[in-house]
Image (cartoon, helix red, strand yellow):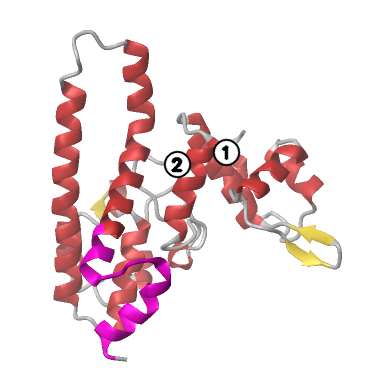
Amino acid sequence: MTEQVLHTSDEPVALTVDDLARRADLPVRTIREYQTMGLLPPPARRGRVGFYGPTHLRRLGLIARLKDRGYSLAGIRDLLGAWRDGADLGEVLGLDPDELVHIDEPGAPATAAQLARALPGLVPDRLDDLLATGAVELGPSDRYCVPSPSLLLLAADALHAGYDADRVLALLATIRDASDTIAAAATAIVAAPPSDADPARLLALASRGRGLLAHGAGRLTLHALGKRLGVTDDSSVPETLRRLLGT
């Protein structure tokens, strides 16, 4: 899979499954398999014909990168499901997915202007405070790296809902502190492997562990949030939220 899959500004907005397969350098049967597993969004239908677009190409590029890092298709499906709870990676903040990325991922870090459009309630007036939370990091050439675009979307939504900047920044700082604690514990395990450990298994753990840790910590946070809210199952979420919000 080549990186050209990820850059789609010049791609047509309507591709048949055969067109998509050619551009993604994949067999049609693989694309069908991804759809069946829920890894790929369904195409737009025009009569009996399905048409795909840049979002599908970007999703195929993401799947390819995750597979290269050792994830199984089932694991990728779980990760995509978790991300979908916030926003599709190709639609986060209304920007191209290559525009807001962490420094160790492909693509260009964000500019100050992009951050200002995404978070006008914090940038530029509270940019230093935002940087202090770790949700945004200063990168090369006065650009900014975003470890988790979903957190920026959360901040933007909270500000838009009327929460003041101090409360939003405090939430981001709490998430940072919890993340540091988790990272410290995970690093301690990696730094002191069992003396009789199989090197191949350690390598496999290192390859998959980051994603599994991120997914697991996120799901556990959602579980803990549900317990605090008194949510017993997914169907009770709307009723619980209405009660808490007094609506």
User: Image height check: is 172 above or below 59?
Assistant: below
**Residue identified by numbered label 2:** 106
125 vs 21, left or right, is left
Whether residue 7 can be seen here:
no
Residue found at the far front of this picture = 232
Res 169 quadrant in image: bottom left
Q: Which residues are magenta?
A: 224-246
Whether residue 76 can be seen here:
yes
149 vs 38, left or right, is left
Q: Amino acid at mark 2?
A: Pro
Q: Secondary structure at mark 1?
A: helix
Q: Tell whether label 2 touches label 1 (CB within 8 Å).
A: yes
- x and y percent of residue 99 in the render? 44, 55
Q: Residues within 10 Å of mark 2 (few under 14, many from 20)?
A: few
- x and y percent of residue 49 in the render? 84, 60
Residue nearest the observer in this picture, 178 or 233? 233
Which quadrant holds the C terminus? Answer: bottom left
Q: Magenta stretch mostly in which secondary structure?
A: helix
- The residue positioned 49% from the left and 59% from the top of the image is 88
- The residue positioned 34% from the left and 43% from the top of the image is 103
Residue nearest the observer in this picture, 146 or 240? 240
Task: For marks 1 and 2, give the CA distance.
Answer: 9 Å
Residue found at the far bottom of this picture = 247
Residue nearest the observer in this picture, 207 or 95? 207
Q: State the mark number for residue 3.
A: 1
Q: Amino acid at mark 1?
A: Glu
- x and y percent of residue 146 in the render? 32, 53
